[in-house]
């Protein structure tokens, strides 16, 4: 089962590179995030996420995200979450004014974990309700308006322990592939939006901190013939209070 999953993940990774014939632009960048977790009980926890995303590696802002959420572990290996994301999307042209397009994103999420002998397979389904600032962007707050759209996301993840069991600071290999699909006004999936593929390592720094770091390739569909390819170095630090 694990070997089949690894083969499938590798296949998805190389298939994403096959889109290069259609891509008209490749973008390099770095995505960094800090997650702060606090358990309210053995079944309820809250999380605050802070995402700082850049392109031209570190020199130009791409996104800034603040994402609080609450999670419920009511059943074994199942986690429900509700959250909100305040997103600032930056135009890559730093001469444009206004440059920031706001998004208010309310979402629900279900995660199902399947433990394996030396790791875990996870399925994550997220439904997003997005209020996007209308174009053209307005300088004056009173002139800003927002349009509503919905999107569904599915992520398949796998992690495998690389260090001997019982190691004080375990290291895991981590991989995931996530697809984003637009929903029509009736709530039916109807168009591909983008795909994320990630490979990297997860390191247990101490009892309270975990760091994930690796390579991520995002493929964004612009229209029927053109795609944007983001090649990113991604780092996520999780801190438990």
Image (tube, rainbow, N blue to C red):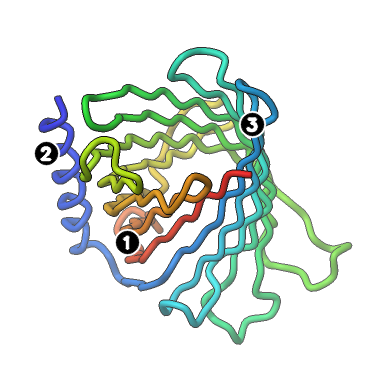
Q: State the CA–CA distance, disc 1 to disc 3.
A: 41 Å
Rendered location of residue 1, percent (x, y): 14, 24
Residue 111 shown left or right of residue 221 in the figure: right
- Furthest residue in direction top, as rendered: 75
Q: How many marks?
A: 3
Read off the residue under disc 1: 226
Q: Is residue 79 depicted above or below 130 in this figure? A: above
Label 1 crowd (10 A; few <14 / some 14-19 / many >=20) = some
Q: Residue furthest right?
A: 142
> What number is the disc on residue 45?
3
Q: Which mark is residue 7?
A: 2
Category of crowding for the residue at label 3, using alpha-carbon neighbours closer than 10 angstroms: few (below 14), some (14–19), many (at least 20): some
Mark 1 or mark 3, whichever is nearer to me = 3
- Disc 2 vs disc 1: Cβ atoms closer than 8 Å? no
| Front position in the image: 101 or 162 | 162
Instruction: Tell me residue 22's x, y (percent).
Output: 24, 62
Q: Position of residue 74 (x, y in %)?
A: 57, 14
Question: Please, what secondary structure does the residue beneath circle 1 have?
Answer: loop
Q: Which image quarter holds the C terminus?
A: top right
Q: Is residue 36 left or right of residue 5?
A: right
């Amino acid at each position: 089962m694990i070997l089949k999953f690894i083969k499938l993940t590798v296949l998805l990774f190389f298939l994403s590179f096959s889109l290069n014939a259609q891509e008209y632009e490749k973008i390099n960048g770095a995505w960094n995030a800090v997650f702060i977790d606090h358990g309210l009980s053995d079944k309820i926890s809250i999380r605050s996420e802070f995402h700082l995303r850049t392109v031209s590696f570190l020199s130009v802002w791409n996104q800034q995200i603040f994402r609080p959420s609450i999670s419920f572990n009511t059943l074994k290996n199942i986690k429900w979450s509700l959250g909100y994301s305040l997103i600032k999307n930056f135009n890559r042209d730093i001469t444009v004014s206004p440059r920031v397009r706001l998004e208010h994103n309310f979402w629900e999420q279900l995660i199902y974990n399947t433990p394996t002998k030396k790791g875990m397979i996870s399925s994550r389904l997220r439904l997003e309700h997005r209020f996007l600032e209308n174009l053209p962007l307005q300088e004056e707050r009173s002139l800003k308006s927002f349009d509503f759209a919905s999107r569904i996301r599915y992520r398949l993840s796998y992690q495998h322990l690389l260090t001997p069991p019982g190691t004080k600071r375990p290291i895991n290999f981590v991989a995931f592939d996530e697809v984003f699909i637009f929903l029509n006004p009736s709530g039916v999936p109807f168009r591909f939006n983008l795909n994320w593929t990630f490979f990297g390592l997860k390191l247990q720094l101490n009892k309270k901190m975990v760091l994930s770091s690796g390579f991520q390739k995002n493929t964004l569909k612009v229209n029927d013939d053109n795609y944007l390819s983001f090649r990113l170095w991604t780092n996520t630090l999780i801190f438990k209070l």
